Amino acid sequence: MYDFPSYYYQIQRQVYPSSCWTTSMVELNRNLRALWEQHVYWTRLTVNSIVGRLPDEKETTARLLRNPTDFAAALAHYYGSDIANQFAQLFTGHLTIAVEVVKALQAGNTKLAADAQKRWYANADAIADFLSRINPYWSKVEWTNMLYEHLRLLTQEVATRLAGNYSENIALSDPIGTQALEMADVMTKGIVQQFPAAFQ
């Protein structure tokens, strides 16, 4: 399905305890954590704008859809622009389908919502598969589990917003944010293990 250079799989395994992290490792982690935080932050604002029919929906959605491009810029340094752009396309799909889910649920169209959610999880499968193919230190099973949990939490966020259950909706921000940072940390460790020479 994807055409990756063979050198991505010619890796010597190397584990870095947190106490041995270099400045470049910390900088990578800081950058990826910021991108994942922006991802869930702008997703939340977009959901709120759609549900509340706010006048900033177009602009807020546009900012959300910049997130995959920002991820691609970070990943291109290690994987090249072609692979980074493939990730951006998959991640854009994750976000555009999320918008479909929100709008279908808001309209009360359960059939359309169910179809969108099915495609949402299929997209998560594709992202997990993609990541496991470009980095031998990224487990397809682990990424599938993390992305499914991400979708589960986002679905709860949408449902509570639509129901007007604002206390629960706000409380969900904590586990959503924590889980996003966990994905950033897994992404960081995989890159450091795959490209050790870049982090000495």
Image (tube, rainbow, N blue to C red):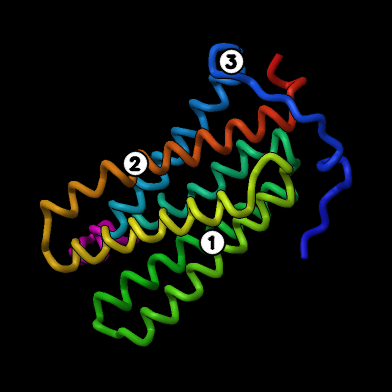
Q: Which residue is mark 1?
A: 124
Q: What separation in Å lies between label 1 and label 2 (alpha carbons)?
A: 18 Å
Question: Which quadrant of the figure contains the C terminus?
Answer: top right
Q: Amino acid at mark 3?
A: Trp
Q: Earlier in the sequence, mark 3 or mark 1?
A: 3
Three-letter amino acid code at the position of disc 2: Gly
Q: Is residue 18 above or below residue 1?
A: above
Label located before the other in sequence (3 or 2): 3
Question: Residue 50 colored magenta?
Answer: yes
Counting from the top left corner in percent of width and height, residue 184 is at 50, 37
Mark 1 vs mark 2: which is more N-terminal?
A: 1
Q: What residue is rendered at 15% in x and 53% in y?
A: 168
Q: Is residue 37 found left or right of 3 in the rendered image? A: left
Where disc 2 sits, the SS reads helix
Up-down relation of residue 159 to residue 181 (above or below): below
Q: Residues within 10 Å of mark 3 (few under 14, many from 20)?
A: some
- Look at the image and give the residue range highlighted in magenta: 48-59
Q: Secondary structure at mark 3?
A: loop
Mark 3 vs 1: CB contact within 8 A: no
Residue under label 3, please give it.
21
State the separation of the CA atoms marked 3 and 1: 30 Å
